[in-house]
């Protein structure tokens, strides 16, 4: 498999013979922003046109330099490199400047002495104008999916193929997937975990609770067992939530060793960094199976950037489950929203690309008064879209297991029919990418294995009203 086609093949799990891509010679030495089709921003090296140091209007569109023939495409850029630059946030604006990094250090030194109202004023000040940023796109960025879809369209047009077979993204033919995660930031939040589990259970939704191992509150074996006994999951959130996990390499290595020890002690497979601070190039030190620290678009987070994808992806051996919706704290306290309208919009944008809907909801914020009612509205809505849009409500570890199994599955042509081989193949579905009458890329699926689904009519409406 050539590197130029590697990312596309891994994304779709399609036969290599259908992805006929070569790379033009003499890519530029320097990387920059360019376009690949209308509205699709890339960052990387190219063999044609010009590149911009910043995302701005008038980017050069390399689509005009793609050479098409019946033998495939010759591309003026490496899509695998461009996608990796986005997923790993290797583009200008995705990392703090030295001034911002220094200001962050000062803020966390002073934070214990600051009142909640002062903290929020500082956070709102930092976020001024951030939603107006052109890149990544707010409120959901789907650049990676757009790049891959544009490539398939060009391949179909160039080769004359009617359709390209691939392994569908989710088990049993589900159109998308969703996970609920709860970050427990304080002692008050810890003490509300049981009530939050009761509310989740009322809507038959299981979640993962990310626990801070040190300083914030005590963590007992009995406390952890209560989650697993009820079918919930335990993950690790940072070490002590002081915002300094990735401040220096030497300190990170010290803390990572402790975090790995807590993961073994807690039986935790997943990790999330406090405040979503991250350096994915350091993840090889972690012993987790999956991470949930990289936002899709980080305009509202202290660390800017975003991975620009709504799909899971591997960072070495760790699977990244990107955060594709706005955190409850940002929604309630920074944006001042008191409805789930933004979450609804994000769900629509993610499911249009068949991606992973990933929520962060804190017991510290979402279990009091009006905010509890808003969270309950979200749970009701999730159960509705689960049925109407055929969304797989899963635990993070279940998504991790599926994505790892899918990454090793193969499509095999037997008696002129495509079938899927590999562990977990009995849950997988053969799909096809093709063009519709308007020349747009669409997906078609073969019949999926039948699985029982639970609808809202199974919920006890009296019990729901009692939790309002």
Image (spheres, rainbow, N blue to C red):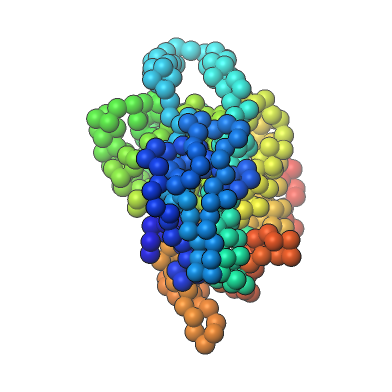
Of residue 349 and residue 174, the one placed in the foreground of this image is 349
Q: Residue, x 52% and y 87% (percent of image)? A: 415
- In the displayed structure, would residue 97 be above or below residue 289? above
Q: Would you say 295 lies left or right of 339 here?
A: left
Front residue of this view, candidates 449 and 219: 449
- Classify residue 33 as left or right of residue 338: left
Tell whether 46 sits left or right of 417.
left
What percent of the width, then of the height, locates residue 46? Answer: 45, 45
* Quadrant of the snapshot with the N terminus: bottom left
Residue 256 visible in image: yes
Which quarter of the picture shows residue 100?
top left
Image vertical order of residue 289 relative to residue 293, above or below:
below
Looking at the image, which residue is at 39% across and 25% down?
242
Residue 287, percent from left and from top? 31, 47
Quadrant of the frame with the C terminus:
top right
Furthest toward the bottom, the residue is 415
Query: What residue is drawn where x is 72% and y is 34%?
Result: 339
Q: Position of residue 4 (x, y in %)?
A: 42, 56
């Amino acid at each position: 498999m050539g590197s130029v086609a590697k990312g596309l093949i891994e994304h779709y799990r399609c036969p290599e013979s259908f992805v006929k891509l070569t790379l033009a010679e003499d890519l530029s030495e320097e990387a920059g922003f360019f376009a690949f089709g209308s509205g699709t921003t890339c960052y990387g090296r190219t063999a044609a046109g010009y590149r911009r140091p910043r995302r701005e209007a008038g980017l050069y569109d390399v689509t005009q330099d793609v050479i098409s023939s019946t033998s495939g495409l010759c591309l003026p850029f490496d899509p695998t490199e461009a996608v990796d630059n986005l997923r790993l946030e290797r583009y200008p604006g995705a990392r703090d400047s030295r001034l911002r990094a220094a200001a962050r250090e000062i803020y966390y030194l002073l934070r214990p002495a600051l009142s909640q109202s002062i903290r929020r004023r500082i956070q709102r000040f930092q976020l001024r104008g951030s939603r107006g940023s052109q890149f990544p796109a707010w409120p959901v960025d789907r650049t990676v999916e757009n790049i891959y879809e544009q490539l398939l369209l060009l391949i179909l047009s160039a080769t004359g193929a009617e359709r390209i077979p691939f392994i569908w993204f989710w088990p049993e033919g589900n159109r998308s997937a969703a996970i609920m995660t709860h970050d427990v930031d304080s002692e008050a939040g810890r003490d509300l975990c049981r009530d939050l589990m009761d509310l989740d259970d009322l809507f038959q939704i299981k979640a993962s609770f990310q626990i801070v191992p040190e300083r914030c509150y005590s963590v007992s074996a009995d406390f952890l067992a209560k989650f697993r006994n009820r079918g919930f999951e335990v993950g690790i959130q940072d070490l002590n939530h002081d915002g300094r996990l990735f401040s220096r390499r030497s300190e990170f290595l010290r803390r990572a060793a402790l975090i790995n020890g807590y993961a073994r002690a807690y039986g935790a497979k997943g990790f999330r960094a406090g405040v979503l601070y991250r350096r994915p190039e350091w993840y090889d030190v972690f012993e987790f199976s999956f991470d949930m620290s990289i936002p899709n678009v980080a305009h509202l987070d202290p660390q800017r950037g975003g991975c620009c994808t709504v799909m899971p992806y591997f960072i070495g051996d760790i699977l990244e489950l990107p955060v594709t919706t706005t955190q409850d704290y940002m929604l309630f306290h920074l944006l001042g929203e008191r409805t789930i309208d933004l979450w609804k919009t994000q769900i629509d944008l993610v499911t249009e690309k068949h991606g992973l809907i990933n929520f962060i909801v804190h017991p510290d914020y979402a279990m009091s008064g009006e905010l509890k009612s808003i969270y309950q509205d979200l749970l009701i809505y999730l159960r509705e879209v689960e049925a109407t849009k055929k969304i797989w409500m899963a635990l993070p570890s279940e998504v991790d297991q599926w994505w790892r199994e899918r990454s090793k599955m193969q499509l095999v042509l037997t008696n002129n029919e495509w079938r899927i081989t590999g562990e977990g193949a009995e849950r997988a579905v053969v799909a096809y990418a093709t063009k519709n009458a308007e020349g747009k890329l669409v997906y078609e699926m073969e019949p999926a294995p039948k699985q029982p689904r639970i609808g809202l009519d199974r919920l006890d409406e009296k019990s729901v009203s009692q939790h309002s």
